[in-house]
Image: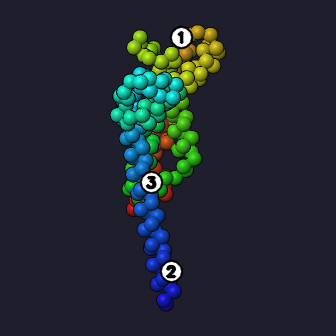
Amino acid sequence: MRSHARGHFTEQLREFAARRLAEILGAALLVSAAALTLALVSWSARDPSLNHATSGHVRNLLGGPGAIVSDLLMQLVGFGAIAAIVPIAAQGLRLMRRRRIGRVMLRVGLCVLGVFATAATASLLPATNRWPLPTGLGGVAGDAILTVPRLIFAGSGVLTAVFGVGAALVAILAVTGAAGLGFESEADMRSRS
């Protein structure tokens, strides 16, 4: 009888620790999403970064680290970086509500696909004269993705626009899937009840 009670207590302790760990991880994901948002919102190409040495003060709200991260993301995927915020925040909230994140590798893959599809879509948009980077609005990755359809479609504006609509749809579906919005598995519904 005594060993049964001890085993029950150990199981409860294990569940308690697992819930607290999930909540801490969820809070860390929410803080990461908020920090990424602040870094990207306050991004300036004039801030010092890994490839831009300057003695000026850092304008980024998160200081030097925020300037470096936001500059790397803007140069690599441009506005595609914004697509990563929603899935990170959604999964953080999910963990804090004591729900499991199912299919983690699928969600990570969908998030990456969403970021690159958003970058490709952003690269199709015209950059203004005030855009400070030599790449398009989708960064290096967005411009690289567009080289294939531009070669295939040989400058056809209509076919390139069709590709852009397709990339935008892929971006929306991938980010939505990565965030877990719009659908629930049977296990999710059972865990809620």
Residue 160: x, y in percent?
Answer: 55, 16
Q: Residue at x 41, y 62 (%)?
A: 20
Tell me the SS state at disc 1.
helix
Residue type (three-letter) at the residue carrying disc 1:
Gly
Numbered-mark total: 3
Q: Which residue in the structure is indicated by mark 1?
A: 157
Q: CA distance from mark 1 to mark 2?
A: 68 Å
Given contact means CB atoms under 8 Å apart, are the residues at marks 3 and 1 in contact? no
The tag earlier along the polypeptide, 2 or 3, is 2
Q: CA distance from mark 2 to mark 3?
A: 27 Å
Residue 179, quarter of the rendered image = top left
Q: Nearer the viewer, mark 2 or mark 3?
A: 3
Q: Quadrant of the C terminus?
A: bottom left
Tell me the SS state at disc 3.
helix
The tag earlier along the polypeptide, 1 or 2, is 2
Q: Which residue in the structure is indicated by mark 3?
A: 25
Q: Which mark is residue 7?
A: 2
Q: In the rendered view, would you say 37 is above or below 154?
A: below
Q: In the rendered view, would you say 10 is above or below 125?
A: below
The tag earlier along the polypeptide, 3 or 1, is 3
Q: Residue at x 51, y 29 (%)?
A: 50
Q: Residue at x 48, y 24 (%)?
A: 53
Does the image show residue 181?
Answer: no
Q: Nearer the viewer, mark 1 or mark 2?
A: 2
Foreground of the two, 27 or 102: 27
Q: Residues within 10 Å of mark 1 (few under 14, many from 20)?
A: few
